[in-house]
Amino acid sequence: MKYKVHIKKTDEGYSIWVPGLPGCWSQGKTEKEALENIKDAIESYLETVEELSKGVRTREVEVA
């Protein structure tokens, strides 16, 4: 699965976040490191959503 991310150079390195996943963000000293770190953040985010959704009636929809 692919997610669009926004990345911004800061004084400390790079800040990176996923607009489609509110609150999902990370950082890195280099752009490459930030991109690797956001992968872990996305995985953790999705695992948390899955855990919080247990027992909740859900459906999936496909968008073209």
Image: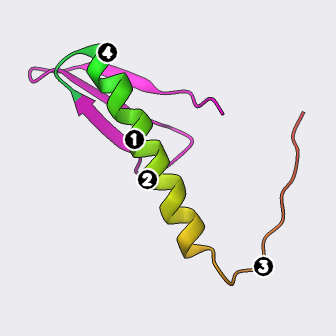
Q: Is residue 6 magenta?
A: yes
Graded by Cα atoms within 10 Å as few (under 14), some (14 to 19) or many (20 or more), the crowding at tag 4 reads few
- Residue stretch in magenta: 1-27
Residue drawn at the location 70% of the way across and 81% of the way down: 56
- The tag earlier along the polypeptide, 4 or 1, is 4
Element type where label 3 sits in the image: loop
Element type where label 1 sits in the image: helix
Q: Quadrant of residue 39?
A: top left
Query: Could you tell me which quadrant the C terminus lies in?
Result: top right
Separation of marks 4 and 3 at Cα, in angstroms: 38 Å
Residue position marked by numbered label 4 in the rendering: 32
Residue drawn at the location 84% of the way across and 65% of the way down: 59
Q: Position of residue 58 (x, y in %)?
A: 78, 71
* Foreground pick, 44 / 63: 44
Residue position marked by numbered label 1 in the rendering: 40
Look at label 4 and name its amino acid: Lys
Residue position marked by numbered label 3 in the rendering: 57
Separation of marks 4 and 1 at Cα, in angstroms: 13 Å
Element type where label 4 sits in the image: helix
* Foreground pick, 45 / 18: 45
Separation of marks 2 and 1 at Cα, in angstroms: 6 Å
The reply, left or right, for residue 36 in relation to residue 64 is: left
Residue position marked by numbered label 2 in the rendering: 44
Residue drawn at the location 47% of the way across and 44% of the way down: 42
- The tag earlier along the polypeptide, 2 or 3, is 2
